Amino acid sequence: MKNPCEISLWNGLMAGYTKNYMYVEALDLFEKFLHYPYLKPDSYTYPSVIKACGGLCRFLLGKMIHTCLIKTGLMMDIVVGSSLVGMYAKCNAFEKAISLFNEMPEKDVACWNTIISCYYQSGNFKEALRYFSLMRKFEFEPDSVTITTAISSCGRLLDLNRGMEIHEELINSGSLLDSFISSALVDMYGRCGHLGKALEVFEEMPKKTVVAWNSLISGYGLRGDSISCIRLLKRMYNEGVKPTLTTLCLSLIHI
DNA sequence: GTAGGGTTAG
């Protein structure tokens, strides 16, 4: 199109870029977009742009956009707000992320997930779990994204009891485990030395992702069981799953 | 219906 004047076209293309980790392309498009005087970025434009800033660690650009946003009133938008929180977290500005989260006038599950993930990324796994409990006190129902991060936090803390508690709660609720949750469980049980449970969750996965394979191999590696690592690598080949560099490092280190 | 933020291994 010579003169795209429909803003949703720009927003859609920018979102497409960021969904596929093409952050440079997203920011290039945003810059081009700003050259059109009759087009103004709106509440759908900013989340993609801000996410691209986070993905590229463009802290200063992100901060500049944040400053512009304060004047527009778009800070009231929950998606704009939570994308800023996520951007600051990705740029390692955790304090800024947390204070911004606290200032948000309204919250939803996704923005709780942002702040929990923020603590997880910063290595503050205890605080991640504290916010996991806190969101429930505020009567937000954790979704699969929340659960994934919570289980991963238990794994990092080697808190097997809390991890099993969350796992049992999941089973009791009757919900099917998606591949993110299952991988996090395999990882958590593996770190805690419960390879039996790790294997059990793994075998129940209808479609075993490469992350699940890697988590399981890593679990056996941690306890020094090289034979099982190599065996799993072979099984992976037999089942037609392509190993990643991570798989090879985890497996070949034991030869 | 059509445009936005949050998740797992290393």
Image: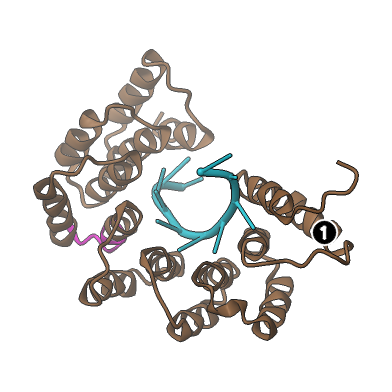
Chain B representation colour:
cyan
Magenta segment: A153-160
Vertical order, A108 against A100 (above or below)? above
Going 23% across and 72% down the picture, which residue do you hit? Answer: A139
Nearest the eye: A113 or A78: A78
| Magenta stretch contains residue A247 | no
What kind of secondary structure does the magenta stretch mostly adopt? helix
Chain to which the residue tagged by mark 1 belongs: A
| Magenta stretch contains residue A154 | yes
Going 53% across and 34% down the picture, which residue do you hit? Answer: A245
Q: Crowdedness of circle 1 by 10 Å Cα count: few (<14), some, many (20+)? A: some
Going 55% across and 67% down the picture, which residue do you hit? Answer: A83
Q: Position of residue A26 (x, y in %)?
A: 73, 53
Please name the colour scheme applied to the rendered image. by chain
Give left or right: position of A140 versus A42.
left
The N terminus of chain A, quarter of image: top right
| Direction top: furthest residue | A238
The quadrant holding residue A218 is top left
Disc 1 element: helix
Chain A representation colour:
brown
Vertical order, A250 against A126 (above or below)? above
| Direction left: furthest residue | A172
Q: Position of residue A190 (x, y in %)?
A: 25, 45
Nearest the eye: A17 or A123: A17
Nearest the eye: A5 or A207: A5
Q: Which residue is mark 1?
A: A33
